[in-house]
Image (cartoon, rainbow, N blue to C red):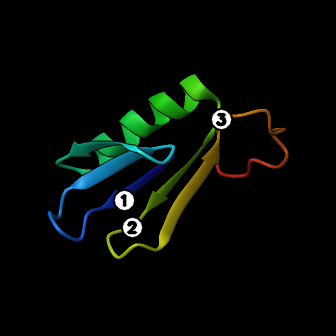
Amino acid sequence: MHVFRSARTGRWLMRAFTTTEQCYRTQAAAARAGMREAKRHRVDLVIHGRHGRFRSKDSYGNETPVLDREH
């Protein structure tokens, strides 16, 4: 899952897998929604900054805590 800013609208999108997108006014709201979905589906969540660079990555899958250094 990815959270990123739309270049066309300037709003924050949460893309689940390849087709599902949800639109949010703030990055924080999109990140919260992404975290809920990532936990539910046990997948990675990547949050991009305003200009598209990686800002944060967290795994909610079967990864060991040793490898997951962010949280």
Disc 3, SS = loop
Picture coordinates of residue 23, whole percent (x, y): 23, 45
Under mark 2, the amino acid is Gly
Tell me which residue sits at (36%, 59%) in the image.
Answer: 4
Tell me which residue sits at (41%, 45%) in the image.
Answer: 19
Tell me which residue sits at (65%, 30%) in the image.
Answer: 42
Label 1, residues with CA under 10 Å away: few <14, some 14-19, many ≥20: many
In this rendering, the label closer to the viewer, 1 or 2: 1
Where does label 1 land, which residue? 4
Where does label 2 land, which residue? 49
Picture coordinates of residue 8, whole percent (x, y): 18, 68
Badge number at residue 18: none
Picture coordinates of residue 52, whole percent (x, y): 40, 72
Disc 1, SS = strand
Where does label 3 land, which residue? 60
Tell me which label, 1 or 3, sits earlier in the chain.
1
**Residue 7 lies in what quarter of the image?**
bottom left
Q: Is residue 13 above or below residue 54?
A: above
Under mark 3, the amino acid is Tyr
Tell me which residue sits at (53%, 58%) in the image.
Answer: 56
**Residue 41 lies in what quarter of the image?**
top right
Q: Is residue 47 above or below residue 38?
A: below
Give left or right: position of 61 versus 64.
left
Picture coordinates of residue 38, whole percent (x, y): 54, 34
Tell me which label, 2 or 3, sits earlier in the chain.
2
Label 3, residues with CA under 10 Å away: few <14, some 14-19, many ≥20: some
**Residue 21 lies in what quarter of the image?**
top left
Disc 2, SS = loop
Q: Is residue 28 above or below residue 32?
A: below
Can the viewer see residue 71?
Answer: no
Tell me which label, 1 or 2, sits earlier in the chain.
1
The answer for how far apart the CA atoms under marks 2 and 3 are is 20 Å
